[in-house]
Image (cartoon, rainbow, N blue to C red):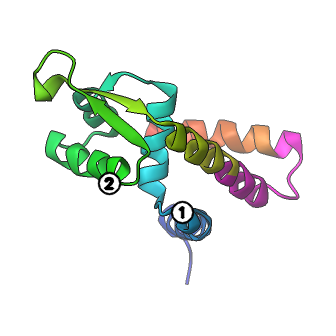
Amino acid sequence: MERDMNDYFREITQNFYACVESKLEKYGLVKGQAQLLLIIKDNEGSTQKDLANYFNVRYSSMSERLSKLEALGFIERVHEDGNLKNNKIYITKEGKTAATQCRRILKDVNDKLLKGLTKKDISTFETTLNKILINSK
């Protein structure tokens, strides 16, 4: 049976997510929460609406995701103007520690996936993926 691009992307993505999630488990996080935490760390003071737009999800879905991070003590929402829709999101000290671990985990998994590839291989691969990404739009 011949494999197509979908087969490769699906299998690589599944393997990547499984590896990442097994390492995030000890922090009580899943992949999507780790990604959100890293975006918040890099963009402190973003609003819930900003984050919903960034991840292309509904406002209510982002609210659920943020509630989980808040329950873990990783973020706090600040209602600066009394309007709940304009609350700003900040990372806590615990969240910064978790974000640092998340970055390390993602780097370790990335390094594992690229093991055995030369810098030239990686550059060619990135160029190819970028072309595929552009074609997919």
Q: Residues within 10 Å of mark 2 (few under 14, many from 20)?
A: some
Name the amino acid type tagged 1: Thr
Toward the viewer: 32 or 75?
Answer: 75
* In the image, residue 34 lies in the stretch drawn in magenta: no
**Residue type indicated by callout 2:** Lys
Q: Does the magenta segment cover residue 109?
A: yes
Please report whichever mark, 2 or 1, sits nearer to the chain's N-terminal start. Answer: 1
Measure how far apart labels 2 and 1 are at the Cα level.
24 Å
Residue plotted at (77% across, 53% down):
111
Disc 2: which residue? 68
Marks 2 and 1: CB-CB under 8 Å?
no
Relative to residue 81, is residue 125 drawn left or right? right
- Asked where in the image residue 129 lies, by quadrant, the reply is top right
Residue 136 drawn at (x, y percent): 42, 42
Q: Quadrant of residue 76?
A: top left
Is disc 1 placed on a helix, strand or loop?
A: helix
Extreme left residue here?
Answer: 83
Other-residue count near label 1 (Cα within 10 Å), few / some / many at <14 / 14–19 / ≥20 = few
Span colored in magenta: 105-121
Q: Position of residue 22 (x, y in %)?
A: 58, 71
**12, 34: nearer the viewer:** 34
**Does the magenta stretch mainly form a helix, a strand or a loop?**
helix
**Disc 2 vs disc 1: which is toward the camera?**
2
Front residue of 42 and 136: 42
Q: Is residue 54 above or below residue 10?
A: above
Q: Residue at x 34, y 32 (%)?
A: 54
**Residue nearest the observer in this picture, 114 or 134:** 114
From the image, tell me which residue sits under label 1: 13
Quadrant assignment for the C terminus:
top left
Residue sitting at the far top: 81
- Residue 127, horizontal then vertical, whole percent: 67, 36
Work out whether residue 20 can be spotted: yes
